[in-house]
Amino acid sequence: MKPTRRFSITLKALQHLGLRPLLLLAKYRLQLHSGFFRWRLPAGGDHLAVPVQPVLALPSQKQLLTVLGDQVQALLVQADEVVAGQVRLFGSQPRPLQLTLPNPLQHWTASESAWVHGEDIKFTWEPGRFGWAITLARAYYLSGDETYAQSFWDHTIQFLEANPPNLGPQWSSAQEVALRLMALLFAYQLCEPSPHTTPQRKTALARSLAAHAARIPPTLGYARAQNNNHLLTEAAGLYTAGVALSAHPHAGYWRALGWRWLNHALQNQISADGVYIQHSANYHRLMLQAALWSAAVAQNNGDSMPQLSLDRLAAATRWLLGLLDDAHGQVPNLGPNDGAYILPLTVFPFTDYRPVLQAASLAFLKSRPFPNGPADEMALWLGQALDTERPIFPPSHPQRLHGKESWAYLRTAHFSSRPGHADQLHLDLWWRGLNLAQDAGTFLYNAPPPWENSLAVAAVHNTLTVNHQDHMLRAGRFLWLDWAQAHITEQDHGPDGRLVRLAAQHNGYRRLGLTHHRQVSCTPDQHWIITDNLLPNRPINDHFTARLHWLLPDWHWELEGTTLRMQSPHGWVKLHIAAAPGVAHQVQLACAGERLHGSAPVAPTQGWVSPTYGVKLPALSFAVTMHAPLPLQFTSTWTLPQ
């Protein structure tokens, strides 16, 4: 018993540091190279062609046309792009739809690289998720134009022939396989009445779907070790396969295994107050979409989600609603953003969260936050009735402060799972639909230096850094150790009950003997005041270098001392930073990796914002640095036009 006990204690400590998944990954790769996972189902079972059953109860065309109104034309324009061989990866600009790879293709166990022909593998995977097929199928269902069904089948057969089961990078990730399986089933169900859906094509698709389902269980253990969206989506894919391929000899196993781990993920990855385990707004949306899809499939096939799963999903819906900016449906670009939008069942842009939140609110809160209209389309596809008239409560979030025409989000995380970004006490500020103080996002995971997930560091967030260090120890592209923990120390509410002052601190610089404390408040006359203090935890005589940073829109600017004025579409916005009296300070202004003011070097990653994966746009990077003994204080005052 002693060796086992020693191992369990060590494993617990390593898990707190974020190392457990790395240990399991090493074991997983060893098993791959030894051929451990090169198994097959009984003779031909993974390629067995069985009838493909519909997985969803489809809404009527009349319902869809009513909610879409004149936005039907926008859907057809999107579908016409795909017919022309163009696709918008990660909601960005059109690029050629590339579904083939040069031969020969190796078994997926040999496809471990994050690169495909010199490019980030995500640009190969994204077309293989078949989001474009969902667009074509929706256009066909609403228009009856056979061009869209023909395009779906032409592209699908091209993909299936060019990417045989278990060969090449399109099969190297079980998550990619699961997402493709769900998209294929949706598109097939809508295109099934078309004369282009021939018996031969049905058979080819059925065989491929069985191979997709068989690919997921061998690495489900790794997904369980990761305990993030991989487990959730792979479980959803398995459950869906078990429903759609009900005549397959392994359908019962797939269905039960998927259902078990789907609900395990929902109940263990979402906290009781609705926070998703990956600390990311976009992954939070992905989780809600996977849950909505699974709930719709379950509802149509006689399964009911456990109450605990539904409770966690209700809390998660409220949490994300609390971060929504009503003007354009955007949210802070919090945490890792890999551009994922797994079920594009809407004409709304990638950055608009209203379709998902409308569907999730109807499903899990039995309320509607937005009026009838195009935002209802996703809810209809995913089986939600639109007859509820009960409005949802106003947006509320424990870290959201409210002004007259503005609001702010203060990042105060207490981590129980691996952080994605070093962003403690980061502040997002929004005013009249404009993101004034913004999060840089992600840009790329896999790229030559300096762009290998480089926007995850504290220096590009709207927070303080000390001695040019992050407040956590970075140990890889996706791994942070020595987690900084934050907690709220004070809060005040206005007469309407909404939060108007919030104070918090984090312990990320405890190794230096100090604490970062931040207070945020909004005055009735549209002033936002942010006070940052670096406080000693013990007697310290040393000098420290403290840098306060703000990432701002790339607008016309004027700089005088530590006062920056920016010309917004609604008038001049002013940001003044008051440093500690009598302490020398340096002011730096940069944009797109270039210095605009100041003498300090500018990192090439400074002054950029990434709204979605693979896209970076210029932004103003405004920083004031002091070198002095503790305590140190900065006061930032935002003045917004009346």
Image (cartoon, grey):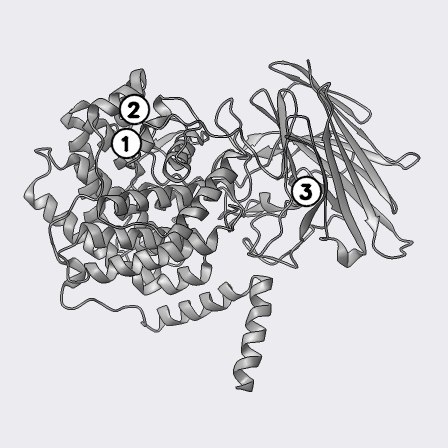
Q: CA distance from mark 1 to mark 3?
A: 39 Å
Q: Which residue occupies the foreground of this view, 593 or 339?
A: 339
Q: Is residue 21 above or below residue 8?
A: above
Q: Residue at x 23, y 62 (%)?
A: 253
Quarter of the image with the C terminus is top right
Judging by the rendered image, the residue that carries numbered circle 1 is 135
Q: Residue at x 65, y 20 (%)?
A: 404
Judging by the rendered image, the residue that carries numbered circle 2 is 75
**Kind of residue sitting beneath label 2:** Leu
Q: Which residue occupies the foreground of this view, 612 or 179?
A: 179
Instruction: Indicate which disc residue 452 carries.
Output: none
- Secondary structure type for disc 3: loop
Q: Residues within 10 Å of mark 2 (few under 14, many from 20)?
A: many
**Whole-percent x, y for residue 608 in the image:** 59, 34
- Secondary structure type for disc 2: helix
Q: CA distance from mark 3 to mark 2?
A: 40 Å
**Kind of residue sitting beneath label 3:** Leu
Is 58 placed left or right of 224 in the picture?
left
Image quarter for residue 498?
top right
The nearer-to-camera label among 3 and 2 is 3
Residue contact between numbered discs 1 and 3, judged by CB atoms under 8 Å: no
Residue contact between numbered discs 3 and 2, judged by CB atoms under 8 Å: no
Q: Residue at x 21, y 44 (%)?
A: 55
Marked residue nearer the N-terminal end (1 or 2): 2
Q: Residues within 10 Å of mark 1 (few under 14, many from 20)?
A: many
Residue contact between numbered discs 1 and 2, judged by CB atoms under 8 Å: yes
Marked residue nearer the N-terminal end (1 or 3): 1
Q: Residues within 10 Å of mark 3 (few under 14, many from 20)?
A: many
Marked residue nearer the N-terminal end (3 or 2): 2
Residue found at the very far bottom of the displayed protein: 1
Judging by the rendered image, the residue that carries numbered circle 3 is 425
Is 433 placed left or right of 369 in the picture?
right
